[in-house]
Amino acid sequence: MNIKNSEQNIQSLRLALNGADAVLIGAGAGLSASAGFIYTGERFQKYFKDFALKYGFRDMYSGGFYPFESLEEHWAYWSRYIFINRYMAPPKPGYQKLYELIQNKDYFVLTTNVDHCFQNAGFDKRRLFYTQGDYGLFQCSKPCCQKTYDNESVIREMTAAQGFTANADNTLRLPEGAVPKMTVPPELVPHCPVCGRPMSMNLRADSTFVEDGGWHEATGRYKDFLRKYQSQKMLILELGVGMNTPGIIKYPFWRMTAENPKAIYACVNFGETYVPEEIAKRSVCINADIGEILKH
Ligand SMILES: [Zn+2]
């Protein structure tokens, strides 16, 4: 990385932020990874060593797709996963830093992240649009209606039933020497209160994804924000968005920048920054760890 160039870019980003009427943030997996939500290595071994040994899983994410034989085992795996990636705070303060930077601006956040980090860091929930779902919500597995259900209390019961404890800081722990159970009791397996089918996660993995009332309201608020600032000085800030689903954040952000001559596009990502020629003059690209940039 060219340090001098990077410092100039950080300065450009700061100026764009100060001068902006509004900030539109688009955030992808890279932002949560930079805040310490890592799905492999030490964090994975700490909570999933038993599943790793039994099934050969190497990371949390791929284990989530495994077709477990029983729902009791499925929810043992998923309840740990949800607890540590949704109800536990991320290890590093990247989200709080970001909030401090933009809290006095008119802002809106579009994110493919489903870990709720924005809301936990203090962002106003009416300024957030989680397009791909939320680890904190269940839905009917074969949706009989467009409803979602908060899962926090049952997730806490499921992890407790496996032998984990959670302290006041919401860190999930296993008592010294304890071996966790790899199943939950049958009575904790969640079922749809309407039709009785098993519940599933409210995540956009396939066509069964439920877009509930909250999802539609967020869509409306996002559109209102874009209408209000479509010809204003808007900072369009893309953080940690890769090329897995560029149609949700990246491509629309490029288009909006092209269509609004007063807009500035900024992209911060580790290893992946690119901007089309058409908007290059009004763009700032920073190829670095987002957490490091936010420290400035
Ligand atoms: Zn149902």
Image (cartoon, grey):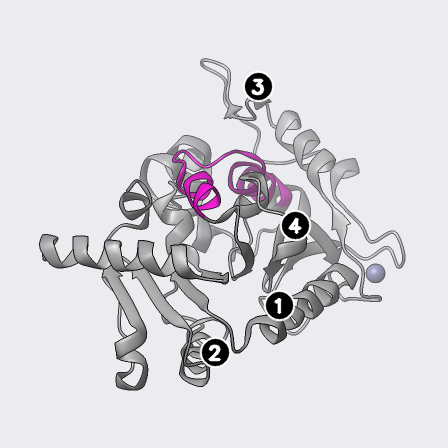
**Residue at numbered disc 2:** 252
Q: Position of residue 223 (x, y in %)?
A: 64, 73
Q: Position of residue 231 (x, y in %)?
A: 52, 78
Residue in the foreground of this view, choosing between 280 and 208: 280
Figure check: 152 above or below 110: above
* Residue at figure coordinates x 74%, y 43% from the top left: 189
What amino acid is found at the position of numbered circle 3 in the picture?
Asn
Sequence-wise first label, 1 or 2: 1
Task: Measure how far apart labels 1 and 4 are at the Cα level.
Answer: 14 Å
**Residue at numbered disc 3:** 167
Q: For mark 2, does the 10 Å Cα neighbourhood hold few (<14), some (14 to 19), or many (20 or more) residues?
A: few
Figure check: 292 above or below 239: above
**For residue 33, which numbered disc appears in the image?**
none
Q: Residue furthest front?
A: 19
Task: Measure how far apart labels 3 and 4 are at the Cα level.
Answer: 26 Å
Asked if residue 235 lies left or right of residue 225, the reply is left
What amino acid is found at the position of numbered circle 1 in the picture?
Phe
The mark lying in front, picked from 3 and 4, is 4
Q: Position of residue 154 (x, y in %)?
A: 73, 36
Asked if residue 196 lies left or right of residue 218, the reply is right
Proximity of marks 1 and 4: CB atoms separated by less than 8 Å: no
What amino acid is found at the position of numbered circle 4 in the picture?
Lys
Proximity of marks 1 and 3: CB atoms separated by less than 8 Å: no
* Residue at figure coordinates x 40%, y 52% from the top left: 31
Check disc 3 and report its element: helix, strand or loop: loop
**Residue at numbered disc 1:** 225
**Residue at numbered disc 4:** 125
Proximity of marks 3 and 2: CB atoms separated by less than 8 Å: no
Task: Measure how far apart labels 1 and 2 are at the Cα level.
Answer: 14 Å
Magenta region: 75-101
The mark lying in front, picked from 1 and 4, is 1
